[in-house]
Amino acid sequence: MNTKLKSIAIFCGSNFGTRPIYREAAISLGQLLAREEITLIYGGTQTGLMGVVADAALDAGGKIIGVIYQGLHARGQSHPGLSSLEIAEDRRQRRARMIELSDAFIALPGGLGTLEELFEVATLTQIGDHSKPCGVLNIDGFYDPLADQLHRAVAEEFMKPEHRDMILIKPTAQSLIEGLSTWQPPVITKWINQPKA
């Protein structure tokens, strides 16, 4: 089934990373979202890859909703040119609002915050709290170690293959958005070899 995604949340670094390829991929993603008329939902700042993807979408005529938390806003880190900016009380409230606004989720390269956000939305799907697709833009193999870790978790019976596979890992923005558009949620429980589970 092909679903028209109206909004996608982007999780990514507030730093740029060491290589130009990360910026280039963030620009391509922002431009693609604008062309496809998919609203970009993101953390609301102008720093790092977050600012790059927002600027690219804005420059291409896209709609961008930023959700920033009060601490960052008070430090002057809000992006000044967004279609809409919401100010949340804290990170938890910000993340909950981004999840509420989004039909799907994409992680670009980033650090702890990016990984936290990715795994939270994947976990919410795994336990059935929502049925929204998520994936990572695997720029130049950045997320290869994540793929290896997910395979290890399956091999050691800490997760089922269906839950590993629900996190899409794609090398291009186009292939990732196409995958998110045709994704179907798993219809199994998370528990393995446990009675009454």
Image (cartoon, rainbow, N blue to C red):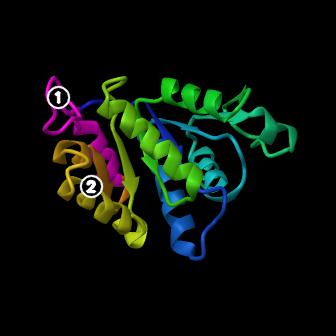
> Residue 19, relative to residue 108: is it above or below?
below
Identify the residue at image location x=39%, y=64%.
143
Q: Name the amino acid, label 1.
A: Val
List the residue tagged with mark 2.
153
Of labels 2 and 1, earlier in sequence is: 2
Q: Secondary structure at mark 2?
A: helix
The numbered mark at residue 187 is 1
Magenta highlight range: 174-197
As drawn, is 62 to the left or to the right of 175? right
Q: x, y percentage for residue 197?
A: 18, 26
Q: Quadrant of residue 94?
A: top right
Q: Mainly helix, strand or loop, the magenta region?
A: loop
Identify the residue at image location x=56%, y=76%.
19
Give the Cα distance between marks 2 and 1: 19 Å
As drawn, is 57 to the left or to the right of 72? left
Q: Name the amino acid, label 2.
A: Ala
Identify the residue at image location x=62%, y=31%.
92
